[in-house]
Amino acid sequence: MYDDHYGLTGRPFQLTPDPRFWFDTATHRKAMAYLGYGLAQGEGFIVITGDVGAGKTTLVGHLMDTIDPTRLHVIKIVSTQIEADDLLRMVATGLDVDSAGLTKAQLLVAIERGLHATARAGRRTLLIVDEAQALPVSSLEELRMLSNFQTGGHALLQIFLLGQPEFRERLHGSDRLEQLRQRVIAMHHLDPMEPEEVEPYMRHRLSVVGWQERPHFTPDAFAALYSGSDGVPRRLNQLAGRVMLYGAIERIDTIDARAVAAVVADIAGDMPGVKPIVVPEAAVAAAPAVEQPISEVAAPDEPVASSPPPPAPEPEPGPLPISILPPTAPPRPIRALHEEAAAVVEAHPTVAPPEPEPKPEPEPEPIVMAVEEPVPAPDAAADVATRIAALEARVDEQDVALRRVLKLLVDWAEGEHSAAPPLPIARD
């Protein structure tokens, strides 16, 4: 339905594995590397595990598309608690061996002959067993026995075992499978996709069926799809298909996190694999609307911090120059006339009073109070002017003191370089 509405040539999120939709995620790329390594070895067991829907079957389908059938004969078995004898008969069928009426001993001989016939034709035999976690121990032991068949020092049969995570635990925890475990040459577990892989994964599947950005998926929609599926491919396909159907029914061309949340709320009870955790993403999708008032509130805070912008209150411009004058006025004569004595000025106690907040000098405190008092009382301009005059007079006194210090330094430099002159400077 949704494929017709959006002009697609097929269903991009069908659950049936299709090699056309293969997407090379990081974990699937590693699995293919292990499978390639196993094929190059030509012997032993390769074990691939993964959760339900992790893409194990799709992985095998992709492998089948990459191998040369003229050089490798593949037998694939999807087991559901197959007993040992039934498993042997399925292998015989894959080798075109008629197993009807044969005893187990005769069946093993027929299988070995079939493997030799395939080898004489210049082909190797690969047995792929899916859902291996359902196999009883007796069936796994029969597989191990089949791997013993050799010709000219080369194994006639190589086996890939695909199963859910419990198969890996079972393989490591059972003493009865010790001999099989020793023949495993490579093992890999398929992890879910990473969050950043969801968007390219969906775009790839959509492009296979002629998607032309309709519907358009927003970035938060991809994040919501990941949250609802945990990155498991089959869950993601289920959720994405329902989201596309929702978009077609509602006739929307843009799918965002709110649309995904609506679908999750509708199917959470029907599809246990889909997590309702994606529902809060609707609030995340609406977050930009909430952020706007926050930014508007932050904007007025800046003018409040820098009091010059508001023009209405007139008393504010008055105190601002008062707070600026004490720190800026004194440094100008000091730097202009006594640049050479800058280091002495910074360390000498007589230079400290010009700073606005000196602790050792008790007199600057009323200066700071004078800066704050005019804010509430605009009629105190006369008192402010008086204090400014006092400050200027004090600056002059400081300038005279600095000149005296400079003169003493010059006299000391021109003298006999004795250690006595610096002592009067310290007492002064």
Image (spheres, rainbow, N blue to C red):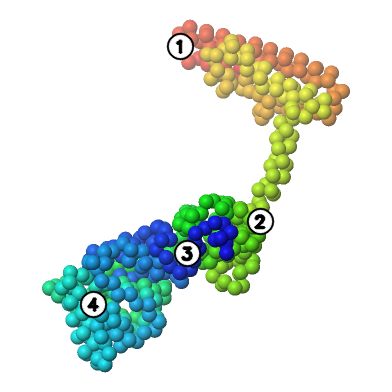
Q: State yes or no: discs 3 and 1 in contact (Cβ < 8 Å).
A: no
The CA distance from mark 2 to mark 4 is 56 Å
The CA distance from mark 2 to mark 3 is 25 Å
Q: State yes or no: discs 2 and 4 in contact (Cβ < 8 Å).
A: no
Classed neighbour count for the residue bearing mark 3: other residues with Cα under 10 Å, few (<14), some (14–19), many (≥20): many
Name of the residue lying farthest toward the left: 152
Q: Which mark is residue 79?
A: none
Name the residue: 23% across, 66% down.
70
Q: State yes or no: discs 1 and 2 in contact (Cβ < 8 Å).
A: no
The CA distance from mark 3 to mark 1 is 87 Å
- Number of numbered markers: 4
Name the residue: 39% across, 63% down.
19
Sequence-wise, which precedes: disc 3 or disc 1? 3
Q: State yes or no: discs 2 and 3 in contact (Cβ < 8 Å).
A: no
The CA distance from mark 1 to mark 2 is 78 Å
Name the residue: 49% across, 62% down.
10
Q: Secondary structure at mark 3?
A: helix
Amino acid of disc 1: His
Sequence-wise, which precedes: disc 1 or disc 2? 2
Sequence-wise, which precedes: disc 4 or disc 1? 4
Question: Which residue is labeled 1 in the image?
Answer: 417
Sequence-wise, which precedes: disc 4 or disc 3? 4
Question: Which residue is labeled 3 in the image?
Answer: 233
Question: Which residue is labeled 2 in the image?
Answer: 283
Question: Which residue is labeled 4 in the image?
Answer: 147
Residue 45 falls left or right of residue 61: left
Q: x and y percent of residue 159 in the render? A: 28, 73
